[in-house]
Structures are given as structure tokens and as C-alpha cells.
Image: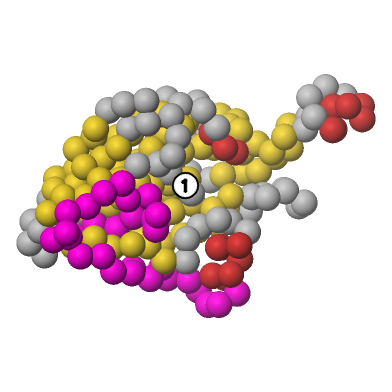
Amino acid sequence: MDLEVVPGVVPSVLATLGAGEAIYAEHGIVLYKEDSVKVDRKTIPSGGLFSALKRTTVGGVPFYLAEFTGPGHAAFSRDGVGELKVMELGPNEVLDVAEGSLVCAENRIRYETIYVKGIAGWAGMWMDQLSGPGKFAIHAYGNFVTMRLQPGESVICERRSILHKTPTMPLAPMVQKVGSGLLGRMMAQEMYVLTGPGVIGLQTGR
């Protein structure tokens, strides 16, 4: 199994699958596939009906994923300008990825979803949680920015800029006011404090 980035204004990834090899992707983002590649559904662990409905209707996370089994080729792309990277997880290595950023992943990578609670009255955020081993492709809207935080170091990030993070890094929600008074409250935005140690990936275009 091989994942190859096809560069461009809107990049894509080309998956080369051997017989019996499989990858999964969000339903609807496949560009094309060869007829020999079979397609099926991959159900997401939901935690019950209410959790699944909340995840799909409020969070926008898919109820199921599409699974593609070789032999053959299949290509995938997100519908936005940016960068695309192929990354690899080692055995038992875990990464949290922002919803709407995963392009495709080897079928042996375990997929779950987690909800990061926001400030009361604010949206919070859903993330995909990937557990290795295996390769996957991730799309950044805009450019990738990677930061490694040492123990005790922290950075405040806008919610939509967060692309991926080390799972042990806490995400603490806060409301960032823009100045004082009524106007400062009206212009406030939801932010998150990330504290090391760990690695965070940001995207510049959302």
C-alpha cells in the first residue's frame, strides 16, 4: 500500500492498493477509482444513538466512513486550497486530528471520534482520534505550521486553526475578548489553550 501526494492548488492523494489492502476515507471525497477497487461502509464506534446523532448533526462528523479495498488505485481530495501531507503512526501511537482534515488512512489504523468541550454557549469541537500503526493523509487549509511545546509551555490558538495535536495535551477553552466594554464582548472569539509537552499542528487558512 502506498500513498502519494499529487501537488496542486487543491492537492490530492493517490492510493495504490495491493490485493486485499484497504483504506478508509470520509464518504464523498473520492475523486476517482479503478473498477477493481471495491467500496464498502466502515462503521464508526458511536457510543450510542444519542452520541451518534450529536456527532453527525452538530459536529458534522460522518456517521460512517467509506472503505476501499484493492487491488487498484483510488484518489482523494478535500475541497479547499492548501497543503496535503502523508504521515505515519507507529504501533500504539495516537494522534488527534481536527474534523474535516483527514483525507484517508490505512484500514489498520483505529478510528474514533472525541468531543472537546467548549465554553458554555460556544460550540466546542470534534476531533478524529487515530491509533497506529499505519499511514494516513491529512489536509491543511492554507499552510502547515508545526510547533513542539516543552513541559509547561502553552500557546493560545483559534479553534479553527487547530489541525492536530498529541492526545495528552489538554485543550482548555477560553473566550478571547477584543478590548473592553460591550464592543469587546461582541467581538470575542472562542480560543483554546494548549499546554505541553507535545506537538501541535496548525493550519493558516480557516
Vertical placement of residue 54 versus 204, above or below:
below
* Magenta-drawn stretch contains 39: yes
Question: Residue lying farthest front?
Answer: 35
Q: Nearer the viewer, residue 26 or 172?
A: 26
Q: Residues within 10 Å of mark 1 (few under 14, many from 20)?
A: some
In this rendering, position of residue 66 left or right of residue 16? right
* Total numbered labels placed on residues in the image: 1
In this rendering, position of residue 163 left or right of residue 174? left
Q: Residue at x 62, y 44 (%)?
A: 172
Q: Which residues are magenta?
A: 22-50
Q: Position of residue 15 (x, y in %)?
A: 19, 47
- Amino acid of disc 1: Gly
Q: Image quarter for residue 57?
A: bottom right
Question: Residue lying farthest right?
Answer: 182
Q: Residue at x 72, y 48 (%)?
A: 122
* Magenta-drawn stretch contains 92: no
In this rendering, position of residue 134 left or right of residue 126? left
Q: Image quarter for residue 182?
A: top right
Quadrant containing the C terminus is top right
Q: Position of residue 47 (x, y in %)?
A: 50, 73
Question: Residue lying farthest bottom?
Answer: 48
Vertical placement of residue 195 versus 58, above or below:
above
Q: Residue at x 48, y 71 (%)?
A: 46
Residue under pointer 1:
100
Vertical placement of residue 62 versus 138, above or below:
below
Q: Nearer the viewer, residue 130 or 136?
A: 136
